């Protein structure tokens, strides 16, 4: 009998995207999403006032209609801010606070360069204070409705019998990461290859 569903990721180093590919994806999203010139100019002016010319030159703000429950998202070093169009259902105060929250991320990363920092660590909190939102919280509490997606694809590990359900099928052969890690030093082995199971759709 199959074990109950458990959330599990199945990724191996050879399949991970490079930073360059990720940046290209962000660039495509930015190019296809509606830009907000007013917010972009505000960010440029702020970056200039903080003495960050590279940020001022490259920062861009877009409205991403694909966003669901996330209010905003900042990308660095692409220096792109994505805003959820659902924010327009709220007040201007909410919209600008979200923009400042995301821009604070870019400020923090720009100042630290390649040094690893906590996304919502002291550098980000300091940037929030400089932007006039000193008590900003890491996560929003806005009632943004999510789209429920049916998980019509099920896979099972032949060894541990863990079942995974997915919205889309795996595009290539994958194995149970837990079993590969436990029995094969984290390397892929066909013995733990996930097999497709028939799901009853209610």
Image (cartoon, rainbow, N blue to C red):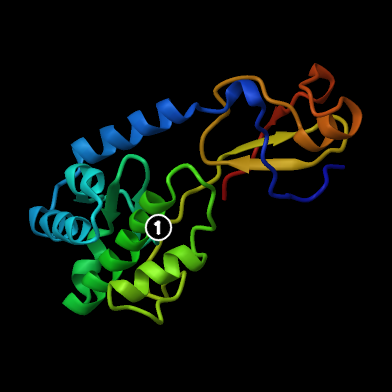
Give the residue at x 11% y 55%: 41
In the image, 165 versus 174, the foreground residue is: 174
Give the residue at x 32% y 40%: 78
Is there any visible trace of residue 68 in the rendered image? no
In the image, 154 versus 121, the foreground residue is: 121
14 relative to 116, above or below: above
The residue at the far right in this view is: 183
Instruction: Name the residue that disc number 1 marks.
Output: 108
Give the residue at x 52% y 41%: 167
Where residue 19 sits: x, y (%)?
A: 46, 30
Where residue 27 sits: x, y (%)?
A: 28, 34
186 relative to 191, above or below: below
Residue 191 relative to residue 54: left or right: right
Residue 39 relative to residue 150: left or right: left
In the image, 141 versus 117, the foreground residue is: 117
| Secondary structure found at label 1 | helix
Is there any visible trace of residue 17 in the rendered image? yes
- Determine which quarter of the picture holds residue 135: bottom left
Give the residue at x 22% y 59%: 85
Where residue 183 sits: x, y (%)?
A: 91, 29
Where residue 108 sits: x, y (%)?
A: 40, 57
- Determine which quarter of the picture holds residue 158: top right
* Picture quarter with the N terminus: top right
């Amino acid at each position: 009998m199959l074990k109950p569903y458990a959330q599990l990721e199945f990724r191996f180093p050879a399949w991970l995207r490079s930073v360059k590919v990720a940046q290209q994806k962000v660039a495509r999203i930015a190019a296809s999403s509606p830009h907000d010139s007013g917010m972009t100019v505000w960010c440029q002016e702020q970056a200039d006032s903080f003495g960050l010319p590279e940020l001022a030159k490259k920062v861009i703000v877009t409205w991403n209609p694909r966003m669901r429950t996330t209010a905003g998202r900042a990308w660095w070093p692409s220096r792109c801010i994505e805003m959820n169009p659902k924010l327009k259902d709220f007040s201007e105060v909410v919209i600008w606070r979200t923009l400042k929250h995301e821009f604070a991320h870019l400020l923090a990363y720009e100042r630290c360069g390649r040094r690893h920092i906590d996304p919502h660590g002291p550098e980000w909190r300091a940037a929030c204070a400089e932007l006039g939102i000193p008590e900003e919280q890491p996560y929003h509490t806005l009632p943004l409705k999510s789209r429920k997606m049916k998980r019509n694809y099920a896979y099972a590990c032949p060894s541990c019998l863990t079942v995974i359900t997915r919205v889309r099928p795996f595009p290539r052969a994958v194995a149970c990461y837990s079993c590969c890690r436990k029995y094969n030093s984290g390397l892929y082995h066909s013995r733990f290859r996930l097999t497709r199971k028939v799901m009853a759709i209610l």
